[in-house]
Image (cartoon, grey):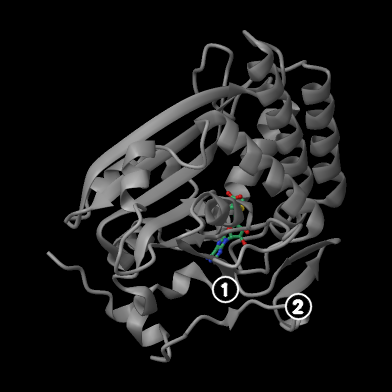
Amino acid sequence: MEETNESASEDRSGSPAPSMYSFNASVDERLILREVYGRTLNSYNEMYFLPADNEEHRRLDLQHQIYTMILGALYPAIPLVRWALRPRRDRRPVILDVGTGSGSWAVDMAKEFPYCEVIGMDLVPPRIAGELPQNCRFEIDDANLGFFHYRGTFDVVHARAIAMGIKDYPALLKDLAQTLRPGGMIILGDGEMQLYDEERRPLSYSEADASWTQRVFFAGYNASKNKGGNIDCPTMNPTWLRSIDSLTDVGWDKVFIPIGPWIYANEREKVLAEMLRSNCLGYISGLEPLLMSEGYLKESVEKMQRGASAELLELKVRLYSRWSFAWAMKRL
Ligand SMILES: C[S@@+](CC[C@H](N)C(=O)[O-])C[C@H]1O[C@@H](n2cnc3c(N)ncnc32)[C@H](O)[C@@H]1O
């Protein structure tokens, strides 16, 4: 059954290129970015309150390396993705990266698949170090406005860690399913905001002796929920994908990674745990605008940040974080 998306079409202008901007160096960043509590944020989306500055984009580059190291590739379900992106005689396969951030996944995909076209879209411009591959371009847009203009366009659609800025994640998935060509793939990746203890049991945040790390993660979780982000999507994605009639072959992989090298079996695991700790320290530092916009006092935020950073650096907490990958294929 073909889904309809009337509201998305109404929000759009009907123009053949209805993204807000096709990104190039001449775009005036003052229209796109704003200063909030000492960091630079996007100006369009009132839900997504993590920074959009160089410091955050460097964190996203590190997070991109973490995802790639976990998977041993840029994507899960390797045979399915390679089949979806196989070279064709009649046209170039097209890839969309929703919420591309610093743009590193889009650029790396453009390099791995030089015969494909890659579009990265985000609320903010990417941070491209080095030369942009000719088969890669960026658009500035809000995924909540819908993808009506891209129906039946893509062979792979990728969305990683964007839930904080998504108003209605199941609706977004339905919308993205419609942008796929038959045989195309949707790929979702997320690090959960839920923390796990050393036995890999989910931690409740109401415990009286909760660590600073638990407290600051919980504060971030609550604040994002208050803003309306669908941040529980990592555990819901397989169910939501299965509920879309036009999708099939739903898959789901979950991986636990220790935050900091308090446990590891080999050098690779140690490096991964250290990278994840650095990523978490950057994430915790970037929470300031989000928490302060929800009424936290600067002193309280800084106290949580200092406490959590010390715990993580001194390996005083034994925590796991869980990373989820879900995917599905559009019926032929
Ligand atoms: C945590 S970053 C992840 C970036 C990238 N996907 C990655 O995995 O490296 C989330 C990104 O999603 C973008 N984002 C959030 N909500 C969005 C929306 N509604 N439309 C477009 N981009 C969005 C943010 O601006 C940010 O760059």
Q: Is residue 210 visible to the viewer in this orientation of the structure?
A: no
x 48%, y 26%: residue:
255
Q: Is residue 12 visible to the viewer in this orientation of the structure?
A: yes
x 43%, y 29%: residue:
254
Q: Secondary structure at mark 2?
A: helix
**Residue on which the image places disc 1:** 139
Total labels: the figure holds 2
Mark 1 nearby-residue class (10 Å; few <14, some 14–19, many ≥20): many
x 71%, y 16%: residue:
261
Q: Amino acid at mark 2?
A: Glu
* Circle nearer the viewer, 1 or 2: 1
When the figure is inspected, residue 230 is found, relative to residue 311, above or below; the finding is below
Q: Which mark is residue 29?
A: 2
Residue at the far top in the pictured view:
265
Q: 70 or 306: which is nearer to us? A: 70
Q: Position of residue 139 (x, y in %)?
A: 57, 73
Q: Amino acid at mark 1?
A: Glu
Q: Position of residue 220 (x, y in %)?
A: 65, 45
Lateral position of residue 303 relative to residue 91, left or right:
right
When the figure is inspected, residue 272 is found, relative to residue 185, above or below; the finding is above
Residue at the far left in the pictured view:
1
Residue at the far front in the pictured view:
89
Q: Is mark 2 within 8 Å of ligand 1?
A: no
